[in-house]
Image (cartoon, grey):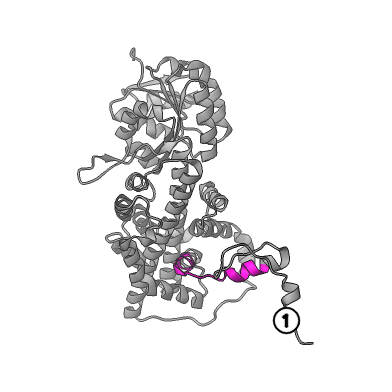
Amino acid sequence: MSEKCDFGLIGLAVMGENLALNVESRGYSVAVFNRTTEKVDDLINGRAAGKKFVGCHSIEELVDNLASPKKVMLMVKAGPAVDALIEQLIPLLSPGDVIIDGGNTHYADTERRTKYVEEKGLLFVGTGVSGGEEGALKGPSMMPGGSEAAWPIVKPIFQAIAAKVGPNDDIPCCEWVGPRGAGHYVKMVHNGIEYGDMQLICEAYQMLSAGLGLSNDEIYEVFDEWNRGELQSYLIEISRDIFSVKEGDDYLVDKILDVAGAKGTGKWMSQLALDLGVPSTLVTAAVYARTLSAVKEARTRASKVLEGPTASKTFSADERKQWVEKIREALYASKICSYAQGFVQLQAAAKEHDWPLNYGDCALLWRGGCIIRAKFLDRIKEAFDENPQLENLLLHPFFTTAVHGGQQAWRDVVVLATELGLPVPAFSTALAYYDSYRRERLPANLLQAQRDYFGAHTYQRVDKPGTFHTEWLELRRTPAE
Protein backbone atom coordinates (compact mmCIF):
# COMPACT_ATOMS: atom_id res chain seq x y z
CA MET A 1 0.00 0.00 0.00
CA SER A 2 1.32 3.43 -0.94
CA GLU A 3 -1.24 5.45 1.03
CA LYS A 4 -0.92 6.03 4.74
CA CYS A 5 -2.99 3.80 7.03
CA ASP A 6 -6.00 4.95 9.04
CA PHE A 7 -5.14 3.03 12.19
CA GLY A 8 -2.17 1.44 13.92
CA LEU A 9 -2.23 -1.51 16.30
CA ILE A 10 0.56 -2.92 18.46
CA GLY A 11 0.16 -6.40 19.95
CA LEU A 12 -1.02 -9.32 17.86
CA ALA A 13 -2.19 -11.83 20.43
CA VAL A 14 -5.66 -13.19 19.69
CA MET A 15 -7.55 -10.08 20.87
CA GLY A 16 -5.26 -7.66 19.05
CA GLU A 17 -5.24 -9.64 15.82
CA ASN A 18 -9.02 -10.02 15.79
CA LEU A 19 -9.52 -6.34 16.56
CA ALA A 20 -7.22 -5.36 13.70
CA LEU A 21 -9.19 -7.59 11.32
CA ASN A 22 -12.42 -6.02 12.60
CA VAL A 23 -11.10 -2.49 11.90
CA GLU A 24 -10.04 -3.46 8.38
CA SER A 25 -13.39 -5.12 7.69
CA ARG A 26 -15.11 -1.76 8.28
CA GLY A 27 -13.22 -0.13 5.43
CA TYR A 28 -10.14 1.17 7.24
CA SER A 29 -6.50 0.43 6.46
CA VAL A 30 -4.41 -0.90 9.35
CA ALA A 31 -0.69 -0.92 10.16
CA VAL A 32 0.32 -3.61 12.66
CA PHE A 33 3.38 -4.38 14.75
CA ASN A 34 4.26 -7.07 17.25
CA ARG A 35 7.42 -7.45 19.31
CA THR A 36 7.77 -10.96 17.90
CA THR A 37 7.80 -9.99 14.25
CA GLU A 38 6.99 -13.52 13.08
CA LYS A 39 3.45 -12.84 14.26
CA VAL A 40 3.30 -9.83 11.93
CA ASP A 41 4.42 -11.93 8.97
CA ASP A 42 2.02 -14.75 9.86
CA LEU A 43 -0.91 -12.33 9.92
CA ILE A 44 0.03 -10.55 6.68
CA ASN A 45 0.55 -13.86 4.86
CA GLY A 46 -2.45 -15.54 6.48
CA ARG A 47 -5.70 -14.01 7.68
CA ALA A 48 -4.81 -10.53 6.38
CA ALA A 49 -3.66 -11.64 2.94
CA GLY A 50 -5.07 -9.40 0.20
CA LYS A 51 -6.54 -6.97 2.75
CA LYS A 52 -5.71 -3.35 3.60
CA PHE A 53 -2.88 -4.15 6.00
CA VAL A 54 0.71 -3.02 6.35
CA GLY A 55 2.96 -5.28 8.39
CA CYS A 56 5.66 -3.40 10.29
CA HIS A 57 8.84 -4.73 11.89
CA SER A 58 9.45 -1.73 14.14
CA ILE A 59 7.45 0.90 15.98
CA GLU A 60 9.13 3.58 13.87
CA GLU A 61 7.93 1.86 10.72
CA LEU A 62 4.40 1.61 12.09
CA VAL A 63 4.26 5.31 12.96
CA ASP A 64 5.69 6.27 9.55
CA ASN A 65 2.85 4.36 7.88
CA LEU A 66 0.04 6.23 9.67
CA ALA A 67 -1.98 9.18 8.38
CA SER A 68 -2.39 12.19 10.70
CA PRO A 69 -3.80 12.52 13.23
CA LYS A 70 -2.12 9.23 14.01
CA LYS A 71 -4.02 6.68 16.06
CA VAL A 72 -2.01 3.89 17.71
CA MET A 73 -3.80 1.26 19.76
CA LEU A 74 -1.89 -0.89 22.26
CA MET A 75 -3.24 -4.39 22.78
CA VAL A 76 -0.55 -5.65 25.14
CA LYS A 77 -0.50 -6.97 28.68
CA ALA A 78 -1.46 -4.33 31.22
CA GLY A 79 1.35 -2.90 33.32
CA PRO A 80 4.94 -1.91 32.57
CA ALA A 81 4.70 -2.96 28.91
CA VAL A 82 2.18 -0.19 28.28
CA ASP A 83 4.40 2.44 29.90
CA ALA A 84 7.39 1.24 27.89
CA LEU A 85 5.48 1.52 24.61
CA ILE A 86 4.20 4.98 25.51
CA GLU A 87 7.79 6.12 26.08
CA GLN A 88 8.77 4.72 22.69
CA LEU A 89 5.85 6.35 20.91
CA ILE A 90 5.96 9.85 22.39
CA PRO A 91 9.04 11.10 20.48
CA LEU A 92 7.69 9.64 17.23
CA LEU A 93 4.27 11.33 17.39
CA SER A 94 3.07 14.90 16.87
CA PRO A 95 0.60 17.11 18.78
CA GLY A 96 -2.93 15.87 18.25
CA ASP A 97 -1.93 12.24 17.70
CA VAL A 98 -3.63 9.62 19.86
CA ILE A 99 -2.28 6.71 21.91
CA ILE A 100 -4.96 4.16 22.84
CA ASP A 101 -4.66 1.51 25.55
CA GLY A 102 -7.17 -1.29 24.95
CA GLY A 103 -5.95 -3.65 27.67
CA ASN A 104 -7.47 -4.60 31.03
CA THR A 105 -5.70 -1.73 32.74
CA HIS A 106 -6.21 -0.52 36.30
CA TYR A 107 -8.04 2.80 36.09
CA ALA A 108 -5.44 4.58 38.25
CA ASP A 109 -2.77 3.82 35.65
CA THR A 110 -5.00 5.37 32.99
CA GLU A 111 -5.52 8.45 35.16
CA ARG A 112 -1.74 8.83 35.42
CA ARG A 113 -1.03 8.09 31.77
CA THR A 114 -3.66 10.50 30.46
CA LYS A 115 -2.09 13.36 32.39
CA TYR A 116 1.44 12.37 31.36
CA VAL A 117 0.67 11.96 27.65
CA GLU A 118 -1.28 15.23 27.55
CA GLU A 119 1.68 17.02 29.12
CA LYS A 120 3.69 15.79 26.13
CA GLY A 121 1.21 17.43 23.75
CA LEU A 122 -0.47 14.19 22.72
CA LEU A 123 -3.87 12.63 23.43
CA PHE A 124 -4.55 9.43 25.35
CA VAL A 125 -7.52 7.05 25.38
CA GLY A 126 -7.97 4.20 27.84
CA THR A 127 -10.74 1.98 26.57
CA GLY A 128 -12.29 -1.13 27.98
CA VAL A 129 -12.86 -3.79 25.32
CA SER A 130 -15.21 -6.64 26.19
CA GLY A 131 -16.49 -9.59 24.25
CA GLY A 132 -13.59 -11.98 24.11
CA GLU A 133 -12.07 -13.23 20.89
CA GLU A 134 -15.37 -13.37 19.00
CA GLY A 135 -16.37 -9.88 20.13
CA ALA A 136 -13.03 -8.41 19.09
CA LEU A 137 -13.52 -9.84 15.60
CA LYS A 138 -17.23 -9.27 15.07
CA GLY A 139 -18.11 -6.40 17.39
CA PRO A 140 -17.07 -5.78 21.00
CA SER A 141 -18.48 -3.54 23.67
CA MET A 142 -16.13 -0.58 24.02
CA MET A 143 -15.84 1.83 26.95
CA PRO A 144 -13.48 4.69 26.01
CA GLY A 145 -12.27 7.41 28.36
CA GLY A 146 -9.26 9.71 28.62
CA SER A 147 -8.51 12.88 26.64
CA GLU A 148 -11.90 14.17 25.53
CA ALA A 149 -10.33 15.89 22.49
CA ALA A 150 -9.42 12.41 21.23
CA TRP A 151 -13.04 11.22 21.04
CA PRO A 152 -13.95 12.87 17.69
CA ILE A 153 -10.76 11.39 16.23
CA VAL A 154 -11.36 7.78 17.30
CA LYS A 155 -15.18 7.81 17.38
CA PRO A 156 -15.80 6.86 13.71
CA ILE A 157 -13.56 3.78 13.93
CA PHE A 158 -14.63 2.75 17.44
CA GLN A 159 -18.33 2.99 16.70
CA ALA A 160 -17.88 1.23 13.35
CA ILE A 161 -16.23 -1.82 14.94
CA ALA A 162 -18.42 -1.98 18.07
CA ALA A 163 -21.38 -4.32 18.52
CA LYS A 164 -24.73 -2.87 17.46
CA VAL A 165 -28.08 -3.08 19.25
CA GLY A 166 -31.52 -1.55 18.91
CA PRO A 167 -34.53 -2.36 16.73
CA ASN A 168 -32.46 -1.78 13.59
CA ASP A 169 -29.11 -2.94 14.97
CA ASP A 170 -27.77 0.56 14.45
CA ILE A 171 -26.92 1.71 17.98
CA PRO A 172 -23.20 1.09 18.69
CA CYS A 173 -22.21 -0.33 22.06
CA CYS A 174 -19.55 2.36 22.28
CA GLU A 175 -19.89 5.86 23.65
CA TRP A 176 -17.57 8.29 25.40
CA VAL A 177 -17.55 7.41 29.09
CA GLY A 178 -15.63 10.27 30.68
CA PRO A 179 -12.21 11.78 31.41
CA ARG A 180 -8.99 10.06 32.41
CA GLY A 181 -9.57 6.57 33.86
CA ALA A 182 -13.37 6.54 33.62
CA GLY A 183 -13.47 4.10 30.71
CA HIS A 184 -11.27 1.53 32.38
CA TYR A 185 -13.18 1.92 35.65
CA VAL A 186 -16.46 1.15 33.89
CA LYS A 187 -14.81 -1.88 32.27
CA MET A 188 -13.60 -3.03 35.69
CA VAL A 189 -17.14 -2.80 37.09
CA HIS A 190 -18.36 -4.72 34.04
CA ASN A 191 -15.87 -7.47 34.87
CA GLY A 192 -16.84 -7.45 38.54
CA ILE A 193 -20.51 -7.87 37.63
CA GLU A 194 -19.40 -10.66 35.30
CA TYR A 195 -17.75 -12.39 38.29
CA GLY A 196 -21.02 -12.14 40.20
CA ASP A 197 -23.14 -13.35 37.27
CA MET A 198 -20.92 -16.38 36.71
CA GLN A 199 -20.91 -17.35 40.38
CA LEU A 200 -24.69 -17.01 40.62
CA ILE A 201 -25.13 -19.23 37.56
CA CYS A 202 -22.72 -21.78 39.04
CA GLU A 203 -24.73 -21.85 42.27
CA ALA A 204 -27.95 -22.33 40.30
CA TYR A 205 -26.26 -25.23 38.48
CA GLN A 206 -25.17 -26.73 41.80
CA MET A 207 -28.72 -26.53 43.16
CA LEU A 208 -30.13 -28.14 40.02
CA SER A 209 -27.51 -30.88 39.88
CA ALA A 210 -26.42 -31.71 43.44
CA GLY A 211 -29.61 -30.40 45.05
CA LEU A 212 -32.39 -31.65 42.78
CA GLY A 213 -30.49 -34.41 41.01
CA LEU A 214 -31.09 -33.16 37.47
CA SER A 215 -29.01 -34.68 34.69
CA ASN A 216 -26.91 -32.57 32.34
CA ASP A 217 -29.51 -33.09 29.62
CA GLU A 218 -32.22 -31.82 31.96
CA ILE A 219 -30.09 -28.85 33.02
CA TYR A 220 -29.56 -28.04 29.33
CA GLU A 221 -33.34 -27.84 28.90
CA VAL A 222 -33.70 -25.66 32.02
CA PHE A 223 -31.09 -23.18 30.84
CA ASP A 224 -32.58 -23.18 27.36
CA GLU A 225 -35.95 -22.22 28.83
CA TRP A 226 -34.38 -19.59 31.08
CA ASN A 227 -32.67 -18.07 28.07
CA ARG A 228 -36.07 -17.42 26.49
CA GLY A 229 -37.25 -15.22 29.36
CA GLU A 230 -36.06 -12.44 31.65
CA LEU A 231 -32.74 -14.21 32.29
CA GLN A 232 -31.85 -14.18 28.58
CA SER A 233 -28.14 -13.43 28.35
CA TYR A 234 -24.88 -14.49 26.80
CA LEU A 235 -23.74 -16.25 29.99
CA ILE A 236 -26.96 -18.26 30.31
CA GLU A 237 -26.69 -19.14 26.62
CA ILE A 238 -23.11 -20.43 26.80
CA SER A 239 -23.84 -22.25 30.08
CA ARG A 240 -26.69 -24.05 28.30
CA ASP A 241 -24.36 -25.01 25.46
CA ILE A 242 -21.72 -26.38 27.84
CA PHE A 243 -24.17 -29.00 29.13
CA SER A 244 -24.52 -30.47 25.63
CA VAL A 245 -20.83 -31.11 24.93
CA LYS A 246 -19.59 -34.69 25.25
CA GLU A 247 -16.35 -36.62 24.93
CA GLY A 248 -17.55 -40.02 23.86
CA ASP A 249 -20.35 -40.94 26.25
CA ASP A 250 -19.21 -38.55 28.99
CA TYR A 251 -20.07 -34.90 29.46
CA LEU A 252 -17.02 -32.69 29.27
CA VAL A 253 -18.16 -30.37 32.07
CA ASP A 254 -18.00 -33.28 34.52
CA LYS A 255 -14.35 -33.89 33.64
CA ILE A 256 -13.19 -30.31 34.30
CA LEU A 257 -11.28 -29.75 37.54
CA ASP A 258 -13.26 -27.54 39.92
CA VAL A 259 -10.54 -24.90 40.27
CA ALA A 260 -11.41 -21.43 38.91
CA GLY A 261 -8.92 -18.98 37.50
CA ALA A 262 -8.99 -15.17 37.74
CA LYS A 263 -7.14 -12.26 36.18
CA GLY A 264 -7.71 -9.75 38.97
CA THR A 265 -10.34 -7.28 37.78
CA GLY A 266 -12.96 -8.66 40.17
CA LYS A 267 -10.51 -8.25 43.03
CA TRP A 268 -9.83 -4.65 41.91
CA MET A 269 -13.53 -3.85 42.05
CA SER A 270 -13.86 -5.35 45.52
CA GLN A 271 -10.79 -3.50 46.82
CA LEU A 272 -11.94 -0.19 45.36
CA ALA A 273 -15.42 -0.68 46.78
CA LEU A 274 -13.85 -0.94 50.23
CA ASP A 275 -11.86 2.23 49.55
CA LEU A 276 -15.06 4.06 48.55
CA GLY A 277 -17.07 2.60 51.44
CA VAL A 278 -19.73 1.03 49.21
CA PRO A 279 -21.04 -2.52 49.78
CA SER A 280 -20.19 -4.39 46.55
CA THR A 281 -20.69 -7.66 48.38
CA LEU A 282 -21.60 -9.83 45.37
CA VAL A 283 -18.30 -9.41 43.56
CA THR A 284 -16.44 -9.95 46.84
CA ALA A 285 -18.33 -13.20 47.46
CA ALA A 286 -17.59 -14.28 43.89
CA VAL A 287 -13.88 -13.53 44.26
CA TYR A 288 -13.69 -15.51 47.48
CA ALA A 289 -15.61 -18.39 45.88
CA ARG A 290 -12.90 -18.59 43.22
CA THR A 291 -10.25 -18.38 45.93
CA LEU A 292 -11.84 -21.28 47.81
CA SER A 293 -12.07 -23.31 44.63
CA ALA A 294 -8.33 -22.88 44.17
CA VAL A 295 -7.45 -24.67 47.44
CA LYS A 296 -8.52 -27.99 45.92
CA GLU A 297 -6.04 -30.16 47.81
CA ALA A 298 -7.01 -28.61 51.15
CA ARG A 299 -10.70 -29.09 50.35
CA THR A 300 -10.09 -32.71 49.46
CA ARG A 301 -8.40 -33.29 52.80
CA ALA A 302 -11.14 -31.44 54.68
CA SER A 303 -13.85 -33.45 52.91
CA LYS A 304 -12.58 -36.57 54.70
CA VAL A 305 -12.82 -34.92 58.13
CA LEU A 306 -15.59 -32.32 58.21
CA GLU A 307 -19.21 -33.44 58.28
CA GLY A 308 -22.33 -31.79 56.90
CA PRO A 309 -26.02 -32.66 56.79
CA THR A 310 -26.55 -36.42 56.63
CA ALA A 311 -30.22 -36.45 55.63
CA SER A 312 -30.90 -36.30 51.91
CA LYS A 313 -34.04 -35.02 50.24
CA THR A 314 -35.99 -36.64 47.47
CA PHE A 315 -38.29 -34.72 45.19
CA SER A 316 -41.23 -35.74 43.09
CA ALA A 317 -41.40 -34.61 39.47
CA ASP A 318 -43.82 -31.82 40.42
CA GLU A 319 -41.63 -30.74 43.34
CA ARG A 320 -38.56 -30.62 41.13
CA LYS A 321 -40.43 -28.46 38.63
CA GLN A 322 -41.44 -26.08 41.43
CA TRP A 323 -37.88 -25.90 42.75
CA VAL A 324 -36.48 -25.22 39.28
CA GLU A 325 -38.76 -22.19 39.07
CA LYS A 326 -37.73 -21.06 42.56
CA ILE A 327 -34.05 -21.31 41.61
CA ARG A 328 -34.76 -19.20 38.52
CA GLU A 329 -36.45 -16.55 40.65
CA ALA A 330 -33.59 -16.59 43.17
CA LEU A 331 -31.08 -16.20 40.35
CA TYR A 332 -32.97 -13.25 38.87
CA ALA A 333 -33.41 -11.46 42.21
CA SER A 334 -29.74 -11.98 43.08
CA LYS A 335 -28.72 -10.70 39.66
CA ILE A 336 -30.70 -7.50 40.24
CA CYS A 337 -28.82 -6.95 43.51
CA SER A 338 -25.50 -7.56 41.78
CA TYR A 339 -26.14 -4.92 39.12
CA ALA A 340 -27.58 -2.54 41.71
CA GLN A 341 -24.33 -2.77 43.65
CA GLY A 342 -22.26 -2.24 40.50
CA PHE A 343 -24.07 0.97 39.63
CA VAL A 344 -23.89 2.23 43.22
CA GLN A 345 -20.11 1.79 43.00
CA LEU A 346 -20.01 3.62 39.66
CA GLN A 347 -21.95 6.49 41.21
CA ALA A 348 -19.57 6.68 44.17
CA ALA A 349 -16.51 6.55 41.92
CA ALA A 350 -17.93 9.25 39.63
CA LYS A 351 -18.40 11.51 42.64
CA GLU A 352 -14.95 10.71 44.00
CA HIS A 353 -13.13 11.36 40.71
CA ASP A 354 -15.41 14.01 39.20
CA TRP A 355 -16.44 11.84 36.26
CA PRO A 356 -19.69 12.89 34.51
CA LEU A 357 -20.87 9.31 33.95
CA ASN A 358 -24.14 8.62 32.15
CA TYR A 359 -25.41 5.43 33.78
CA GLY A 360 -28.02 4.73 31.11
CA ASP A 361 -25.27 4.87 28.49
CA CYS A 362 -23.14 2.51 30.60
CA ALA A 363 -25.98 -0.02 30.53
CA LEU A 364 -26.30 0.44 26.78
CA LEU A 365 -22.56 -0.17 26.31
CA TRP A 366 -23.08 -3.58 27.93
CA ARG A 367 -26.20 -4.43 25.93
CA GLY A 368 -24.27 -6.10 23.12
CA GLY A 369 -20.85 -7.50 22.35
CA CYS A 370 -19.70 -7.96 25.95
CA ILE A 371 -19.73 -10.94 28.30
CA ILE A 372 -22.57 -9.64 30.51
CA ARG A 373 -24.81 -8.68 27.57
CA ALA A 374 -28.39 -9.42 28.48
CA LYS A 375 -31.97 -8.47 27.75
CA PHE A 376 -32.13 -7.29 31.36
CA LEU A 377 -29.83 -4.32 30.58
CA ASP A 378 -32.55 -2.61 28.54
CA ARG A 379 -34.49 -2.21 31.77
CA ILE A 380 -31.49 -0.68 33.51
CA LYS A 381 -31.03 1.87 30.73
CA GLU A 382 -34.74 2.72 30.91
CA ALA A 383 -34.50 3.17 34.69
CA PHE A 384 -31.61 5.64 34.47
CA ASP A 385 -33.14 7.41 31.48
CA GLU A 386 -36.26 7.99 33.59
CA ASN A 387 -34.23 9.10 36.61
CA PRO A 388 -30.52 9.85 36.04
CA GLN A 389 -30.14 10.38 39.81
CA LEU A 390 -31.66 7.01 40.75
CA GLU A 391 -30.08 6.10 44.07
CA ASN A 392 -30.30 2.34 43.69
CA LEU A 393 -31.80 0.11 41.00
CA LEU A 394 -33.76 -1.71 43.70
CA LEU A 395 -35.79 1.49 44.18
CA HIS A 396 -36.99 1.66 40.58
CA PRO A 397 -40.57 0.29 40.35
CA PHE A 398 -39.68 -2.39 37.78
CA PHE A 399 -36.91 -3.87 39.93
CA THR A 400 -38.80 -3.36 43.19
CA THR A 401 -41.67 -5.40 41.77
CA ALA A 402 -39.30 -8.05 40.48
CA VAL A 403 -37.53 -8.64 43.81
CA HIS A 404 -40.81 -8.54 45.71
CA GLY A 405 -42.23 -11.18 43.39
CA GLY A 406 -39.23 -13.49 43.71
CA GLN A 407 -38.43 -12.86 47.34
CA GLN A 408 -40.05 -15.93 48.90
CA ALA A 409 -38.55 -18.27 46.32
CA TRP A 410 -35.16 -16.64 46.90
CA ARG A 411 -35.41 -17.30 50.63
CA ASP A 412 -36.62 -20.86 50.07
CA VAL A 413 -33.62 -21.64 47.85
CA VAL A 414 -31.13 -20.31 50.40
CA VAL A 415 -32.85 -22.35 53.14
CA LEU A 416 -32.83 -25.50 50.99
CA ALA A 417 -29.15 -25.02 50.20
CA THR A 418 -28.41 -24.70 53.92
CA GLU A 419 -30.39 -27.84 54.71
CA LEU A 420 -28.52 -29.76 52.00
CA GLY A 421 -25.12 -28.35 52.98
CA LEU A 422 -24.58 -26.79 49.55
CA PRO A 423 -22.63 -23.50 49.55
CA VAL A 424 -24.45 -20.62 47.86
CA PRO A 425 -22.34 -17.62 48.92
CA ALA A 426 -23.56 -15.34 46.12
CA PHE A 427 -27.26 -16.16 46.57
CA SER A 428 -27.03 -15.69 50.33
CA THR A 429 -24.86 -12.57 50.08
CA ALA A 430 -27.34 -11.00 47.67
CA LEU A 431 -30.20 -11.77 50.04
CA ALA A 432 -28.28 -10.39 53.02
CA TYR A 433 -27.61 -7.19 51.06
CA TYR A 434 -31.29 -6.88 50.18
CA ASP A 435 -32.38 -7.47 53.78
CA SER A 436 -29.78 -5.01 55.10
CA TYR A 437 -30.66 -2.32 52.56
CA ARG A 438 -34.39 -2.55 53.19
CA ARG A 439 -34.12 -2.24 57.00
CA GLU A 440 -34.33 1.19 58.57
CA ARG A 441 -32.41 0.02 61.63
CA LEU A 442 -29.46 -2.38 61.74
CA PRO A 443 -27.57 -3.68 64.81
CA ALA A 444 -24.71 -1.22 64.22
CA ASN A 445 -25.90 0.65 67.30
CA LEU A 446 -24.38 -2.13 69.41
CA LEU A 447 -21.25 -2.07 67.26
CA GLN A 448 -20.80 1.65 67.90
CA ALA A 449 -21.33 1.09 71.62
CA GLN A 450 -18.62 -1.60 71.54
CA ARG A 451 -16.22 0.74 69.72
CA ASP A 452 -16.88 3.51 72.21
CA TYR A 453 -16.46 1.09 75.14
CA PHE A 454 -13.01 -0.18 74.16
CA GLY A 455 -11.65 2.75 72.17
CA ALA A 456 -13.61 5.91 72.99
CA HIS A 457 -14.61 6.19 69.33
CA THR A 458 -17.81 8.10 70.24
CA TYR A 459 -21.31 7.66 68.80
CA GLN A 460 -24.33 9.61 67.68
CA ARG A 461 -27.85 9.27 69.07
CA VAL A 462 -31.32 8.93 67.56
CA ASP A 463 -32.94 11.18 70.15
CA LYS A 464 -30.69 14.25 70.02
CA PRO A 465 -27.94 15.74 67.85
CA GLY A 466 -24.24 15.76 68.66
CA THR A 467 -21.37 13.36 69.25
CA PHE A 468 -21.22 11.42 72.51
CA HIS A 469 -18.89 9.29 74.60
CA THR A 470 -19.84 7.20 77.61
CA GLU A 471 -17.69 5.90 80.47
CA TRP A 472 -19.14 2.43 80.13
CA LEU A 473 -17.00 0.90 82.88
CA GLU A 474 -18.36 3.35 85.42
CA LEU A 475 -22.01 2.84 84.43
CA ARG A 476 -22.03 -0.88 83.77
CA ARG A 477 -23.79 -3.38 85.98
CA THR A 478 -21.30 -5.71 87.66
CA PRO A 479 -22.19 -9.38 87.09
CA ALA A 480 -23.20 -11.23 90.22
CA GLU A 481 -20.42 -13.38 91.54
Under mark 1, the amino acid is: Arg
Q: Nearer the viewer, residue 78 or 438?
A: 438
**Rendered location of residue 233, percent (x, y):** 33, 54
Q: For label 1, count other residues whose C-alpha is less than 10 Å away and answer few (under 14), some (14-19) or many (20+).
A: few
Label 1 element class: loop
**Is 134 placed above or below 428 here?**
above
Type of secondary structure dominating the magenta stretch: helix
In the displayed structure image, the side of residue 264 where residue 205 appears, left or right: left
Residue 433 placement (x, y as % from top left): 48, 65
- Which image quadrant is residue 416 in? bottom left
Q: Is residue 308 above or below residue 57?
A: below
Residue found at the far top of this picture? 2
Coordinates of residue 167 in the picture (x, y in percent): 20, 46
* Residue drawn at point x = 48 percent, y = 63 percent: 426
Q: Which residues are magenta?
A: 430-450
The answer to whether one can see residue 35 in this image is no
Which residue is at the front of the view, 204 or 116? 116
Determine the residue positioned at 41% across, 41% down. Answer: 356
**Residue denoted by label 1:** 477
State yes or no: residue 441 in magenta. Answer: yes
Residue 277 appears in the figure: yes
Can you name the residue that lies furthest to the right here?
Answer: 481
* Quarter of the image where the N terminus is located: top left
248 left or right, relative to 121: left
Query: Which percent across, then down, holds residue 143?
Result: 40, 39
